[in-house]
């Protein structure tokens, strides 16, 4: 086999990565449209949806580890020419996702008392529970959609993942408009209407992807749905072994940012608003890193499955270089026009907007460092998943986020008196620690 050139690696990484990045951005749009449209409806419903959606997402991140484990497993099995294993791994990923979605449903059903115990107001807790009781039915389809997205992406079908996600955004907006506000004679459900829209988008995505995976002539040879009920205990054990650490790693990272929002709220309302805007902006560019990271997972898993170590190393170097390029472009953008970017999220006619822009611009300049560290840690995690290494990365990431990042944020923000700037410097410290340790782990294995 002729060795691949650097330019060939770059083209194939982009061919996979750009649709996956677009799909990640579209997934963000689902959340943004919910928040914006419920915000038009009322303040209390907005608070309930923000609280409910963030609670749903935390549980989803934990359960999505099984779906993310399917990505490198299928890619490696396909590279070995083991089409039977492709089917087995994907099915058991679906089995575990369904089991997880059923197991956590009671948490959503009795979420009201949990939210009250966490200090939320009775009115918001009650409405958030109504939202979660409905949207909880969407956990199984949401996780199964993620499994099918991993399966199809590993097979190189990233374009359909993007198209279906964009279609889901359109359905979500349309059903939101009908059911939140009661347009065209539909019932006016407010926050519950948003939950119904979310489930509609998830079920539609599941049906389309399921039919595509089962009926497309070029994919029929995998027989994905044939005798779906038959257990495959070795494959289930392998998906569990890889998936649980991935889910816990995502939970640890999500907890880092939730903790940072809580601490920023102790500093002040203006600072918390600026923090939220700066994180949203950073998250948009972060989705490009996520797409490249998923692409790197697929490509590294293929070389890993073939036993091609030199190809694996070159593919990894190209993916890291491309992620560094995205980070450099983000740094230039954030340092050049920070005030103008933050102002896009605000009504500048309001008196508090000027203070939020000024503070947000400072945080956005810190986000320049944030992007570099965050991009490298998510890329390292993607590369490690490609070689099916998830347990040690879970430990390294958790230590970096919770035993370095959060303590540094607290110490710099409060005892040392640096406020929100110190809090963000602590986040950067944790992410730098994660990126350095995870990259060291990968290159040690790659050699």
Image (spheres, grey):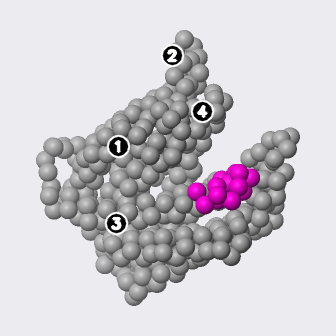
Q: Residue furthest top?
A: 185
Q: Position of residue 439 (x, y in %)?
A: 48, 80
Query: Could you tell which of marks 1 and 4 lies nearer the N-terminus?
Result: 4
Start and end of the magenta stretch? 262-279
- The kind of secondary structure the magenta stretch mainly shows is helix
Q: Residue at x 13, y 47 (%)?
A: 230
Neighbour class for label 2 at 10 Å: few (<14), some, many (≥20)?
A: few
Q: CA distance from mark 4 to mark 2?
A: 19 Å
Q: Nearer the viewer, mark 2 or mark 1?
A: 1
| Image position, residue 349 (x, y; %) | 86, 40
* Residue at 81%, 47% in the rendered image: 352
Relative to 194, residue 236 above or below:
below
Location of residue 14 by image quarter: bottom right
User: Which quadrant, please, contains the N terminus?
Assistant: bottom left
Does 274 lie within the magenta span? yes
Mark closer to the chain start, 1 or 3 = 1
Residue beneath label 1, please? Answer: 107
Give yes or no for residue 169 being in the magenta stretch. Answer: no
Q: Point out the image quarter for the C terminus.
A: bottom left
Residue identifier under label 2: 187
CA separation in Å, label 3 and label 4: 36 Å
User: Quick one: label 2 or label 3, which is nearer the N terminus?
Assistant: 2
Left/right placement of residue 251 relative to residue 19 reads left
């Amino acid at each position: 086999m002729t060795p691949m050139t650097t330019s060939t690696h770059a083209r194939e990484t982009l061919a996979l990565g750009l649709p996956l990045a677009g799909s990640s951005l579209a997934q963000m749009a689902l959340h943004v449209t919910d928040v914006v449209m419920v915000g038009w409806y009322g303040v209390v419903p907005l608070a309930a949806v923000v609280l409910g959606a963030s609670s749903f997402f935390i549980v989803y991140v934990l359960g999505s580890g099984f779906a993310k484990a399917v990505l490198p497993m299928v890619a490696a099995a396909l590279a070995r020419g083991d089409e039977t294993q492709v089917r087995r791994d994907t099915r058991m990923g679906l089995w575990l996702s369904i089991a997880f979605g059923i197991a956590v449903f009671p948490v959503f059903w009795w979420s009201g008392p949990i939210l009250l115990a966490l200090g939320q107001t009775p009115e918001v807790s009650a409405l958030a529970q109504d939202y979660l009781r409905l949207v909880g039915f969407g956990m199984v389809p949401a996780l199964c959609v993620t499994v099918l997205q991993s399966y199809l992406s590993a097979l190189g079908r990233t374009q359909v993942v993007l198209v279906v996600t964009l279609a889901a955004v359109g359905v979500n907006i349309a059903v939101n408009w009908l059911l939140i506000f009661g347009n065209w004679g539909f019932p006016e459900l407010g926050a519950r209407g948003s939950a119904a829209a979310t489930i509609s988008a998830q079920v539609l995505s599941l049906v389309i992807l399921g039919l595509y995976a089962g009926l497309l002539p070029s994919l029929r040879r995998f027989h994905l749905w044939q005798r779906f009920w038959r257990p495959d205990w070795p494959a289930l054990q392998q998906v569990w072994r890889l998936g649980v650490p991935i889910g816990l790693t995502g939970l640890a990272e999500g907890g880092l940012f939730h903790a940072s929002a809580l601490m920023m709220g102790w500093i002040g309302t203006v600072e918390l608003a600026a923090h939220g805007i700066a994180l949203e902006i950073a998250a948009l560019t972060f989705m490009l890193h996520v797409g490249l990271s998923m692409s790197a997972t697929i490509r590294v898993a293929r070389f890993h499955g073939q036993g091609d170590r030199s190809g694996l190393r070159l593919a990894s170097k190209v993916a890291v270089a491309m992620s560094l390029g995205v980070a450099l472009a983000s740094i230039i953008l954030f340092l050049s026009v920070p005030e103008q970017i933050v102002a896009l999220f605000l009504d500048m006619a309001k008196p508090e907007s000027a203070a939020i822009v000024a503070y947000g611009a400072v945080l956005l300049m810190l986000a320049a460092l944030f992007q570099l560290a965050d991009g490298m840690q998510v890329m390292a995690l993607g590369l490690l998943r490609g070689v099916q290494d998830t347990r040690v990365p879970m430990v390294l990431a958790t230590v970096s986020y919770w035993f370095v990042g959060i303590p540094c944020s607290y110490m710099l923000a409060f005892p040392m008196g640096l406020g929100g700037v110190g809090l963000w410097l602590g986040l950067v410290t944790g992410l730098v620690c994660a990126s350095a340790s995870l990259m060291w782990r990968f290159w040690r294995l790659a050699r």
